[in-house]
Image: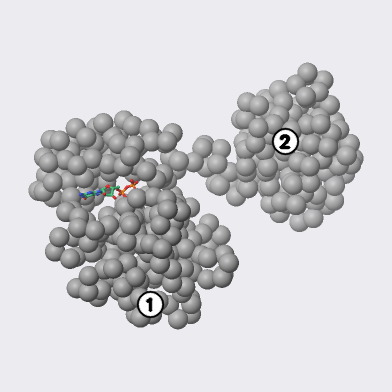
Amino acid sequence: MRIHEYQSKMMFSRYGIPIPNGRVASTASEARQIAEELGVRVVVKAQVLVGGRGKAGGIRLAKTPKEAEELASTILGMDIKGLPVRKVLVDEAISINKEIFLSITNDRDTCQPVMIASEAGGIDIEEVASRMPDKIIKVYIDPLLGLHDYQARDIAAGIDLPHVSWKSFSSVARGLWRAFWENDATLAEINPLVVTQDHKLVALDGKVIFDDNAMFRHPDQVEMRDQDVDTPSETSARKYGLSYVKLEGQIGCIVNGAGLAMATMDIIKLFGGEPANFLDIGGGASADKVAAAFRLVAADANVKVVLINIFGGITRCDEVAHGLLLALSELKSPIPVVVRLAGTNSDEGLRLLADAHIITAETFVEAAQKATAVVVKRGEG
Ligand code: GDP
Ligand code: MN
C-alpha cells in the first residue's frame, strides 16, 4: 500500500528526518489559512499517488496566502494521470542548493535491503540510472545490524556532499532505515532530499510503500489507506476479506482457495469462455461473505453468468448455498448462476439450490461447460 507524500513526511519526521513546516488541506480556504499561519512563501502540492506531479502542474509556488488559495483551488480541481486531487499539502517554500535522491528498497538479487543514493536528485531516478549509472551509489544493509555510520559516510562521500552536511546526512539515512525497517516498508524514498542555502538537509518529497502482507502488525497503517484511490469493488472486497481482481471477461467466478480459483479460470478458457474476475472467498467462507462476493461480481456490467465453484473442506457447502440464496433474494439478479459444490455438506447445499431453480453441476468440467454455454447461447462468446 502506497501512502501520500504528506503521510510519508509525517512518518519521516517521527524518525528525526527534517521536513518543511506545513499541513494538508482539503479546501482552498484551508490552504489560505495554512499559508497565513506559516507567514512565508509556500508550495502548494497535489496529494495524489503518482509520480511526476511537478510536470503535470500539481506543484506550484505561492508568494501570498491569496495566491495559495487560488492555486489550491486550481489544483484541487485537477486530475493527475487519471487520479482526482482531493487534498493539497501546503508547505513552507525552501530555497534549494542541491537535490539528492535517497531511497531504501529490497534488492531481489542479493535478498537484502539496499540504500540507493544519487547526487542527481529531484528528477526521475530511472532516467539517472540509464543515462548516468555512475551517479548512483548503492549500499546493502544487513537488517540485523542496521545501517552503519561508515556506510552513511560512504554514501555522503559518494554523492559529493560537502563535509559540513555529513553528520546530518547520517542522521537522515539512519532515520530512513528505521522508518523502512520498523514499518515493514518495501520502499522508503526521499526525492528530493535537499541541501538548503545554509547547509541543512530537508526531505521535500516522500514516498512510502508498505508491505500489505505485514499490515496486520501495523494497525496505524490501515488507517492511512486512501479509500479514494480504490474502486468501490476493491474497498468492498477488502472489507469482507475477499481476494478480488477484476478482469475483462463475462463469466464471473466465485471460488474458495487461490489454486482452485486459478484452475477455474483455466477451465473457463479451455471451454472458450473468458473469466470476468479472479475471486477467492477464502476458507470457512460464511454466508454473508458469499453474499458479499455475489454482490461484487454481479455489480460488474460485463458479467453474463456467474460460476460458483466450491470445494468444501472447512467451508460448508450448505452455508455457501444459504449465502447465495440470501444474495439472490436480496438482489433479484437476472444473471444465471451455475453452481458446483463438492465436499462437506454438498448434498444438502445442492438440494437447497436446486429447489431455488439454480443451475447445478456435479463436476468441475460440467460446471464450466454449463457456464460457457450460457455466454455462447447469448451470442456473446
Ligand atoms: P514530484 O514531481 O511528484 O516528484 O514532486 P516533488 O515534491 O519531488 O517536487 C518536484 C520538484 O519541485 C522538486 O524536485 C523541486 O525542484 C520542486 N520543489 C518542491 N518543493 C519545493 C520548494 O519548497 N521550493 C523549491 N524551490 N522547489 C520545490
Ligand atoms: Mn519527487
The amino acid sitting under disc 2 is: Pro
Which SS class for mark 2? loop
The amino acid sitting under disc 1 is: Gln
Q: Nearer the viewer, residue 153 or 281?
A: 153
**What's the residue at 51%, 65% (across, down)?**
106
Which SS class for mark 1? helix
List x then y, in percent, for residue 134: 41, 63
- Residue for badge 1: 151
Residue 1 appears left or right of 304: left
Q: Which mark is residue 348?
A: none
**What's the residue at 33%, 39% (across, down)?**
55
List x then y, in percent, for residue 32: 16, 39
Residue count near mark 2 (Cα–Cα under 10 Å), binned few <14, some 14–19, many ≥20: many
Q: Nearer the viewer, residue 117 or 128?
A: 128
Work out how far the residue at label 1 is from the one at label 2, CA to CA, in angstroms: 50 Å
The image quadrant that residue 236 belongs to is top right
**What's the residue at 43%, 40% (across, down)?**
228
List x then y, in percent, for residue 336: 76, 26
Task: Say if residue 179 shows up in the picture.
Answer: no
Q: Which-is-in-front pick, marks 1 and 2?
A: 1
Q: Is residue 105 above or below residue 39?
A: below
The image quadrant that residue 158 belongs to is bottom left
Q: Quadrant of the C terminus?
A: top right
Q: How is the image coloured?
A: one colour
Residue count near mark 1 (Cα–Cα under 10 Å), binned few <14, some 14–19, many ≥20: some
* Earlier sequence position, callout 1 versus callout 2: 1
List x then y, in percent, for residue 297: 65, 34
**What's the residue at 60%, 50% (across, down)?**
241
- Residue for badge 2: 275
Q: Is residue 167 above or below residue 356?
A: below
